[in-house]
Amino acid sequence: MINLFEYQNKVDIQASLDGLEGFLDEIWNSREKNSFYSVNGNDKIESQRFLQFIHKSNELKSNKYVGVIHYQGAKINLLPKIFFDSEKEYQTNEVNQIHNHILWWLSYCRKIKFPNYQASLGSAKSDFFEVLIYLFSKYTRELLNSSIYQQYEEVNRELSFIKGRLNINEYISENLSKGKWHKLNCTYDAFVFDNEFNRIIKYVTTLLFNATSNQDNKKNLREILFILDEVSDERATAEQCSRISFNPMFGEFETVRDYCQLFLTNCVSFDYKNDLKLFAFLLPMEYVFEDFIFGFIDKELENVTAKAQRSDTYLDEDKAFNLKPDLWLKTDHKSLIADTKYKIVYSDEKDPKKGISQNDLYQMLAYAVRFEVNEIILFYPNTIKQGQEEGTELTIKDALANGKEIFVKAFQLPIINRELLESDLETKTDLSELFESTKSELKNKLEKILVPTTKHSD
């Protein structure tokens, strides 16, 4: 098992990893073009951006993605940099607890479409990807055992009586001309079991069955395939998932759809050189952090209205430079802009910039001016090495606006449960139970920041 933390440690490239770079290039080039892998012009880059291959020193280093890669019997864990401690040797239990943190963050994410279903985490031996398969397979199997999804689909068939619409042109060219006048070529709507959504479930289930090595997962997935035996085998895409909607009667199937979209979008590859033992599940961590903070505020803070990435404002009059702050927040007393920065803030009392980078400050100032708000907040994650979360505040006076004051505040948010990292992994435990104390701590911190006594309110 190889543990790599974003941009932190390096490991020697073993002989068993020969061909890994080509495998990752293949995944990168077959990724969904409408996914977050395409942000910031990444869709124009042809070589993979998951790992750095330093050929001069024959070393491997992680970039900004977290997740897991299985290749030629080797497992590479790509872990968030905020958990990195150079003096520590990470054991399997600690890696699993880090994965639990990622799963908890994902449970609040909206754009990544992590399903809301919170199940027990299963076997302590499971890695990040196996846990995701476990959650999907358990929920889907239980749902299909109690409810079968059927929907109306347009069907083309030859019948001995007219049903729906008679296809005149096809009837003349395919039936009359060939002496099959008694067979009528019809198009009609049928309430069918072999529908697009069930074909997506079957495709994803088949992929996961070939990837998992966990026996509980294999058992659950085998039962799903048995139930869907009469459904056609067809390749599916994440784009198909995004087009599917359900009426309230089938609302529980939304979770299954979201799981399928999660697996099909987030760079899962199983068929490289027909070897089904190779796969990767990778997420850009800065995207996860932004989406987690938005989802958490939206779900847990009743007195705050959150909107994600307003993009209707431009820096210049020609509308060439679009401003897209991560969060637009509104309370009873004020509106403010918040930006998430997935960076490690090194606290230094002698630092006059108080840990805020100059580029971040320029960006926040542009937001304040164009969105006409006098309060900007920067959210950073806390780290495993820092004893307490830092908070800083800067005041800027706008000379062009008669000395109007703009307040820029920066806070580290408690998104790590340190006690959990030091405890044994519990089986059959809900994510919500594991992170109850972290949720309360984060909620209290955000309420203190966003809904305080209105010192700087409009």
Image (cartoon, rainbow, N blue to C red):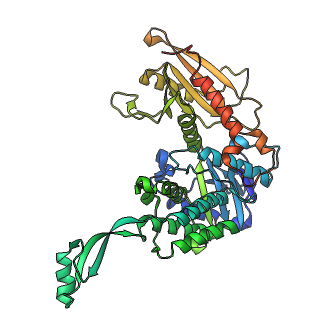
Q: Position of residue 410 (x, y in %)?
A: 61, 25
**In this view, which residue lies farthest toward the top?**
402
Q: Is residue 372 left or right of residue 113?
A: left
Residue at image position (59%, 59%) is 139
Residue at the farthest bottom position: 179
Left or right: where 213 falls relative to 158:
right
Give percent across and percent down for residue 10.
Answer: 73, 51
Quarter of the image where the N terminus is located: bottom right
**In the image shown, does 342 or 433 lie closer to the viewer?**
433
* Looking at the image, residue 59 lies above or below residue 221: above
> Dividing the picture into quarters, in which one does residue 450 lie?
top right
- Residue pictured at 49% horizontal, 57% vertical: 253
Query: Is there any visible trace of residue 214 in the rendered image?
Result: no
Q: 24 or 306: nearer the eye?
A: 306
Up-down: is 107 above or below 201? above
Residue 214 coordinates in the image, percent (x, y): 69, 66
Rendered image quadrant of residue 17: bottom right
Q: Position of residue 109 (x, y in %)?
A: 55, 44
Query: Is residue 17 something that shows in the picture?
Result: yes
- Relative to 174, say whether 290 is above or below: above
Tell me: 165 left or right of 210.
left
> How many numbered circles are shown?
0
